[in-house]
Amino acid sequence: MNKNTTRYTALLLAAILAALPLSAKKKTAAIAVPQGIAVSNQSVEPLAGRVTVGMDISLDSLTLRSRTRIILTPSLRGEGTEAQMPQIVINGRRQNIEYKRFSHKDYAKETTVVRRYNKTAQSLRYTAELPLEDWMRNADLVLVGDYCGCGDTLGSLVVPVKCLRTPLLEYVRPEARPKAYELAGSAYIDFPVDETILYPEYRRNPEELKKIVDTINKVKDDPNATITQIEIKGWASPESPYEHNAYLAENRAKTLKDYVRSLLSLSDTVFTVSFVPENWQGLRECVLASESLANKDAILALIDKEMDPDAKEARIKSLYPADYTYMLGQFYPGLRRSDYRVAYTIRPFTVDEAREMLKTDPGHLSMEEMYLVAQEYEPGTDEFNDVFATAVRLFPDDPVADLNAACAEMEHGDLDAAGRHLEKAGDSPQALNARGVLAYRRGNVEEARELYRRAAEAGCAAAQDNLRNLERHY
């Protein structure tokens, strides 16, 4: 190695060392290297199935002889494997002329080539990306230097920079569960006083009956749905003797069931009928919400008292006649209602069917089916993230949905969103590990260590791997 080579070897070593330390997605201020190269704003981002590397390279302090060329090759190295990225070629004046005439054919079109203008401010932004492979998650970024341009790399100057210590996340496959759903509502069917015969055109019955029929048809007409039960529950108001109200509530509910069944041609076995003779619960809610009753508290106390229903109603009527008259006109009609509930199941879907259903009617999918669809996409992609975002929207109170959504957000790079989901993700080993990954990516190494330890002790394989890597490098 001659004198000039020695000089540039030292210069290149200084330039490489200037890049230390480097961590994933960490930016550094520019590091001035006397008579050399400054590297700043380094970033290494393993997201959406790609590894993207970026850095600013300043040549302000570099003095390069006219016939000299420096070639820098950023590479990822790990587990005996290396993946090179496009090279950076820095030419002196005469060397650049030769490059333009002859040498440009020897380099890939992705190569970044610059001519150094000595004693002038000069910088470049370098970016490159590679497909993300598993080994890269624990790889080193190195800068390999070739001074002469002949392929004789300066091996002694290759300085590994730990950068891709990407902790592992462990998603949880939801349990396979029957897809059982229900639609429910209340209808206010008018019957003539003391009658149990249903008149479809009587008063507001047309629109109230339509509510029930439309709800049932919504399920009946769905080719993926099977009705398992239709329940009709009749409620009567508290006036009149209790036994008479029980008779009216039961038989009006049966009449309504028979009418609806005849319209929809459904088996009688799918229907169930129940009734509440007197709707004291509904009356209490009306009284509690009212601002018009002079004796509101006293009436509430009587409603809550354990006593014979007929005696209770008679006492309210005799003690507070004005309030009773008001309730009879304003509250009692709404207490006479018919609740309906349609229970049904949705058939299972193949992954291909589920992928299409996710676009048109995701409410028909189970969490497990959505999880299987997500496996068709690369972690970190918008498609992958959207599946878990849909799952947590449809199952907002399920810790597994929040855990998987948190992991997807971290893969996508949104740590704040991941943190919000992890607040509701429970304390499973996988959730502890995910919280450890979030802490690590936010720079809280000791917090991450403790969370990994707890998750690893609970049997989380990803946490065991993360803890080993953490102990190895910190």
Image: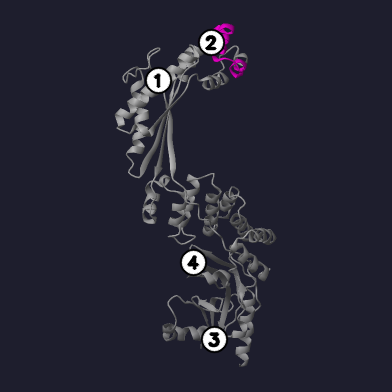
Is tag 1's residue or tag 3's residue first in the polypeptide sequence?
A: 3
Q: How crowded is mark 4: few (under 14 residues within 10 Å), some or many (20 or more)?
A: some
Is tag 2's residue or tag 1's residue first in the polypeptide sequence?
A: 1
Instruction: Give yes or no for residue 134 being in the magenta stretch.
Output: no
Q: How crowded is mark 3: few (under 14 residues within 10 Å), some or many (20 or more)?
A: many
| Residue 471 visible in image | yes
Viewer-nearest residue: 94 or 89: 89
Residue ID for mark 1: 251
Q: In this view, does 76 lie to the left or right of 250?
A: right
Residue at screen point 37% across, 29% down: 212
Can you tell which of label 1 and label 4 is closer to the viewer? 1
Q: Position of residue 328 (x, y in %)?
A: 49, 12
Q: Position of residue 249 (x, y in %)?
A: 44, 20
Can you tell which of label 3 and label 4 is closer to the viewer? 4
Q: Position of residue 124 (x, y in %)?
A: 53, 71
Viewer-nearest residue: 161 or 81: 81
Q: Which amino acid does label 3 sit on?
A: Thr
Q: In which quarter of the image is residue 471?
A: bottom right
Q: Which amino acid does label 1 sit on?
A: Asn
Residue ID for mark 2: 324
